[in-house]
Amino acid sequence: MKLLCCLLTGLAAGGVLAGVSDLSAVYRNGQVFLRWSEKDRPADARLEVRGSARPVSRENFEEAPLLADMLNTGSAGDWWLDASNFLVKRTAAIRADEPFAGDTAENEAAKKKRRGFVIEDGGSPIPAEGGLHVHTPRKEETGKRYFAVIARSGGKVCGFSSLAEPVEVGPGFSRPLALSKRGLKKDSCKGMALVVRLHGRGGGAGVDGKGRAVGTHIIYASRDFAWREGIPFKFQVSRAKTVVNLVLNDRVWIGRKMDRSEISDSRDAVRAISTFWMGCNPGIARSIKGPKFVCDNYTERYVVHLVRWAQEYLGTDPAATYIIGGSMGGTGAVQLATHFPEVFSAVVAFVPVYSYTWKVNPKGKDGKPQVTSSPSMGRIICSTGKFTKKNPAVMPDGKLLEDYLNGAKNISRPEVDMPPVFATNGRKDASIPWVNNPDFYRGADAGKQAFSVYWNDCNHAKASVRCPADVKKEWDLDRLKRYRLDRSFPAFSRCSDNRDFGNGDPSQGDITGWINRGFDWQVVSDTPERYAVTLSVSYPGIVYPVTADVTLRRRQQFKFPAGTRLAAVVGGEKREIVIDENGLLTVEKVTFKDARPVEVSITKK
């Protein structure tokens, strides 16, 4: 037994300084699980982890590469189970926007005994006392490795523990662990569609309204997915009859509460923040007061990583991944779809922010901005810092964050087959300024992308609820599953039935309206020789005739270079179509005289 332990783990001996002791290390399934004991450490102590191919001592630890820092003491304790890490106790209005109302969750969670994290598939929680760090090795870190944990307080070392014997480390991979033995098994969801669900602002807490733990899996982040490696994320994966649901949590542990000099919204004064499904400032554990402001898209990479895991481990169909979200979740859905169009098959976004801008709704008759005076750019301040238009935030590569999050620009790229987006908006939405929406609407249409939106005069909570039945039907999973990465579909643009969304003034244009409402289709053929599709448009109250341009997206086999001339028959009428400079095949001004389908057949001349 002693020999087996030595083979699997590294053991601490001699390398100890009061406050931290008994460091151990286990390499398992692509990660190194480091645990240690803590005693009599200062309340303000922060810990760091270092690793090296050589033994690490108190004399040379500064020379060993830093793997992670700013760890809190007691890091083995599962902070996801403490409701206070997610919830700010302030006014009734703020509490109503949180995932649970009243004091139920806090009170119930407080009654439960503090537990540690789970670090093995289906395993029991480890003791909550002491420390835990999970390291994901880089390619150059394989072989025998030594590790050390150092505690500092007031800039001075107040604790140290290192391995006397190395641990054998293999290739690194950040892999989810099931929180119970009932977790879905490998290849248990072969060929099933995957639906990624993103929550709104205030969601993502680790406990429900009665203080009960939520989540089926946990994953310890590599450097690519958080401001430091080892941050634990919980999520829920479940299998329904025809789909696998992946319910994610956008909560990132920063180990402190930010003050009002760093944030604009008091709800962000929590130890587990929301990133608006984007990412955060790499220095957020210390300060985001500037003067320079950086935001890395950690959260986006994390979401895509979990999608790939579901495909590779559970066996979900790579061509059938759908993303659905509301409010902040809808914002993330649009961001992810336009940044990673090769991953997602289709999108449903309820009342999203399409683009982060500094625009403010135009002033009304009283001289004040209508509905809301807040620009959408203020949303991303919560995880980046109080940057301004004159002192903008940037990505790690120096590119402007505002440019990266410009959904109107991203969706308008005609050369990219973007996932179809089905969305809702409300003109009286005080959370999402209406002034942002028209640019995205125009961009999607100009880019000949598949986009359908319904808007009304409702507020944030009611805009989607009060959509008509035919619009809601488009959100059904059975309808969404027609869109696949390995299957062509038509994108409609310049539709004569579209309503006037105006110039960004909430009171200008059609108060209730839509873009590309009621279209239906079926691709009959997509071969090297012929493309055929039937098209129709219908909804209660529609007035015919209706015309629209139809761009055939994601063509699998019927592909030709720019300038190729094609012969088409559209509703019995012969036409010539030329592949444009972006490689697009667009059938212009298809006329729908009534609800009957229009047949389109195209061959090479």
Image (tube, rainbow, N blue to C red):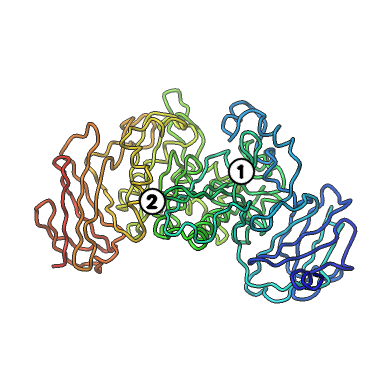
Q: Is residue 212 above or below residue 39?
A: above
Give the left or right position of residue 305, taking residue 549 as reference.
right
User: Dividing the picture into quarters, in which one does residue 152 lie?
Assistant: bottom right
Q: Position of residue 328 (x, y in %)?
A: 51, 42
- Which of the marked residues, 2 or 1, is nearer the chain's N terminus? 1
* Few, some or many residues within 10 Å of mark 2 (<14, 14–19, 20+): many
Front position among marks 2 and 1: 1
Judging depth in this view, the residue of 299 and 104 nearest the camera is 104
Name the residue: 13% across, 60% down: 576
Name the residue: 24% across, 55% down: 523
**Which residue position holds label 2?**
346
Judging depth in this view, the residue of 192 and 521 nearest the camera is 192
Give the amino acid at mark 1. Val
Q: Are marks 2 and 1 in contact (CB under 8 Å)?
A: no
Quarter of the image containing the N terminus?
Answer: bottom right
* Few, some or many residues within 10 Å of mark 1 (<14, 14–19, 20+): some
Give the amino acid at mark 2. Ala
Q: Position of residue 112 (x, y in %)?
A: 74, 38
Task: Please identify the residue farthest to the left as the structure is shown.
Answer: 573
**Which residue position holds label 1?**
214
Q: Helix or strand or loop: what does disc 2 sit on? A: strand
Give the alpha-carbon distance from disc 2 to disc 1, as whole Å. Answer: 27 Å
Name the residue: 42% across, 59% down: 191
Give the left or right position of residue 575, taking residue 47 as reference.
left
Q: Is residue 583 above or below residue 520?
A: below
Q: Position of residue 177 (x, y in %)?
A: 62, 57
Q: Position of residue 100 (x, y in %)?
A: 60, 33
